[in-house]
Every structure is written in structure tokens, then in C-alpha cells.
Amino acid sequence: MRILGSGFGSAAGERRVVFTGPGPAGVEGTILSWNDDGVSVLVPAGTVVGGVAIVEGERRSNALLFEVASDLVSFVDDLRPIFSRQGCASCHGGTNDLFLDTPASILRGGNHGPAAIPRRGAESLLVRVLRGPADGINRMPFGSPQIPAADILLIEDWVNQGVRNN
Ligand code: HEC
């Protein structure tokens, strides 16, 4: 799940994300990414409803209640249209080492190895190159403005959901 807000800072530091119930209580969440405007945390498997708080030492934020949506990001219906709308497919569909046609080709990746690591969206090259230059690779799409943040989040969510072929 992603906790949206502002002023979170650029890194977790000493802060932890803890589930408070209803649902899992006292469980510490695995933090997937931490940015100033949002924190992504893995929800324990099987959770339907829950509460979550940010804890630092003795201090704890108010619990935020959430419900787990059943919708998964779809490769075919969500990601493919982004790749074609943003021009990725024209460079990465036959003329470049990296093919974005299928989840398998993304896992195989290009010159720099796998473009996605299942469940580790923020660390995956496919997501990092959209936020800025990474590992000596230009920011993508090469030669065009940055794509909308919502599209990047969708791609990150798809990786965090396990690089499904759906
Ligand atoms: C104009 C052509 C062009 C467009 C458009 C483009 N790319 Fe690229 N892409 C490249 C080239 C060339 C490289 C090789 C490395 C470099 O240029 O830094 C690359 C490299 C990459 C890599 C790293 C692959 C590796 O292992 O080396 C990823 C991931 C990537 N692009 C994703 C995307 C995504 C996602 C989009 C759309 C948002 C996109 N690219 C749009 C040309 C393009």
C-alpha cells in the first residue's frame, strides 16, 4: 500500500511502519520505498482491512485505516497502453536490447540485466529510469519529458505486485 502525504522526508531513518489493527496488529511493515510525498509498505498477506501508523521511538502517528482493493494492476490493460502512449514501445520493441512487450522480456531485461525485480518496484531499473538517470542510463523516455507520476506509480505497483502476466 502507499501512504500519500507530504513532508515524510527522503528516507525512513529511525521511523518504522507498524500495523495497528483491525486486522494484523503489532506487525512491522516491510518498507518498499520512502519519498517525501509517499511511503510504500507491503501489506501482510491475506489482509482485507487494517490500520497503519508511523512510529519513531516513543512517538506514534494516528492510525490510518485502510481496505485492500481487489484490483491488481494489469500488464495488458494498464502497462501496455502506457508504454505505447509514452513512446517507449517505439524504441523498445525490436530496435533496442530491451523489449517491453511482455513481462518475461522485462524480467530478461537489457544490457543492464533484469529491468524489474518482482516485489521490489523502487529498486527496479524500469521504475528508476523513469524518475531520473540511473546506473549510467539516461532518464526515460529518452529525449522526451518525464511521464506523469501516476503512470510511474502504476508501473511501480505492478512490479510490487509480482510482475504478473495479467
Ligand atoms: C527514443 C528512444 C527511446 C524511448 C522513447 C525510450 N527509450 Fe528506454 N532506452 C533507449 C536507449 C537508447 C537505451 C540505452 C541506454 C541509454 O540510452 O542510456 C534505453 C534504456 C532503457 C532501459 C535500461 C535497459 C538496460 O538494461 O540497459 C530501460 C529500463 C528503459 N530504457 C525503459 C524505457 C521506458 C519505460 C520508456 C518509456 C517511458 C523508454 N525507455 C523510452 C531508448 C529509448
Image (spheres, helix red, strand yellow):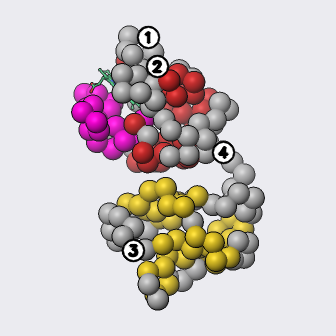
Q: What amino acid does circle 3 point to?
A: Glu
Disc number at residue 99?
Answer: 2
Q: Is residue 15 at all visible to an observer of this figure?
A: yes
The answer to which of 165 and 69 lies nearer the viewer is 165
Residue 24 as seen in the image, left or right of residue 160: right
Q: Which of marks 3 and 1 is in front?
A: 3
Which residue is painted at 43% across and 74% down in the image? 15
Q: Nearer the viewer, mark 3 or mark 2?
A: 3
Q: Earlier in the sequence, mark 2 or mark 1?
A: 1
User: Which quarter holds ligand 1?
Assistant: top left
Give SS at disc 4: loop
Give SS at disc 3: loop
Residue 3 image offset from top left, x and y in percent: 51, 65
Cα separation, mark 2 vs mark 1, equals: 7 Å
Disc number at residue 72?
Answer: 4
Residue 46 image offset from top left, x and y in percent: 75, 58
Q: In which quarter of the image is residue 19?
A: bottom right
Disc number at residue 14?
Answer: 3
Cα separation, mark 2 vs mark 4, equals: 23 Å
Q: Do the residues labelled 2 and 1 touch (CB within 8 Å)?
A: yes
Q: Can you say whether 85 is above or below 97 in the image?
A: below
Disc number at residue 94?
Answer: 1
Give SS at disc 2: loop
Q: What amino acid does circle 4 point to?
A: Leu
The answer to which of 112 and 81 lies nearer the viewer is 112
